[in-house]
Image (tube, grey):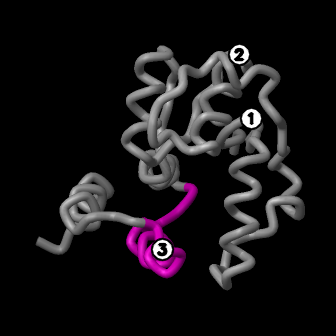
């Protein structure tokens, strides 16, 4: 089976957010221990316009997206996704990755992953959850 994504870059601000989550007891992975993840700082954060409420992690993700050829940036927050559209970046989110994994046969079911994301405090509305499960062919209705 070919690679899901050829490489995964995480900017330092996102790595810090994950470490903070781990520090308060959220069961998140140690990014430094994952061999296919590389922490890489964007060279020029100033390429991303200043937008109120855009977090440091989203801003660094967008900046990396502008610097890396053919990047697909992963953004779950609405404001970050809107900025990606403005910057003409290709993007997806956690749910898009899960749906792709299901279609490609990399996971058999999305529902258990969503349950785990709930435990990790990933915010997901009931409506969005139902829509994703329906797209994955896992709806119970």
Secondary structure of the residue carrying tag 1 is loop
Please indicate, yes or no, whether residue 74 appears anywhere in the rendered image: yes
Front residue of this view, candidates 49 and 93:
49
In-image side of 51 versus 69 (left or right): left
Residue lying farthest bottom?
25
* Residue indicated by mark 3: 121
Secondary structure of the residue carrying tag 2 is loop
Residue at 40 percent across and 38 percent down: it is 79
Give the alpha-carbon distance from disc 2 to disc 3, as whole Å: 32 Å
Mark 3 or 1: the one toward you: 3
* Residue indicated by mark 2: 69
Residue at 81 percent across and 49 percent down: it is 37
First in sequence, mark 1 or 2: give its number. 1
Residue 61: image x %, image y %? 64, 35
Vertical placement of residue 21 versus 107, above or below: below
Give the alpha-carbon distance from disc 1 to disc 2, as whole Å: 12 Å
Q: Quadrant of the N terminus?
A: top right
Mark 1 or 2: the one toward you: 2
Q: Are marks 2 and 3 in contact (CB under 8 Å)?
A: no
Residue lying farthest left?
141
First in sequence, mark 3 or 1: give its number. 1
Q: Which mark is residue 6?
A: 1
Is 108 covered by the magenta stretch? yes
Residue 19: image x %, image y %? 75, 66
Give the alpha-carbon distance from disc 3 to disc 1, as whole Å: 28 Å
- Disc 2 residue crowd, few under 14, some 14–19, many 20+, Cα 10 Å: few
In-image side of 24 versus 113 (left or right): right
* Residue bounds of the magenta highlight: 106-122
In-image side of 39 versus 131 (left or right): right
Vertical placement of residue 113 versus 16, above or below: below
């Amino acid at each position: 089976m070919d690679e899901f994504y050829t490489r995964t870059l995480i900017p330092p601000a996102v790595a810090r957010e994950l470490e903070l989550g781990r520090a308060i007891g959220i069961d998140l992975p140690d990014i430094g221990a994952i061999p296919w993840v590389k922490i890489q700082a964007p060279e020029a954060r100033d390429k991303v316009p200043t937008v109120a409420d855009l977090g440091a992690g989203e801003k660094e993700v967008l900046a990396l997206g502008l610097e890396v050829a053919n990047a697909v940036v992963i953004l779950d927050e609405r404001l970050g996704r809107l900025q990606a559209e403005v910057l003409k970046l290709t993007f997806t989110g956690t749910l898009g990755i899960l749906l792709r994994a299901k279609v490609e046969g990399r996971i058999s079911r999305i529902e258990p992953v969503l349950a785990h994301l709930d435990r990790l405090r990933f915010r997901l509305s009931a409506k969005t959850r139902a829509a994703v499960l329906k797209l994955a062919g896992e709806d119970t209705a």
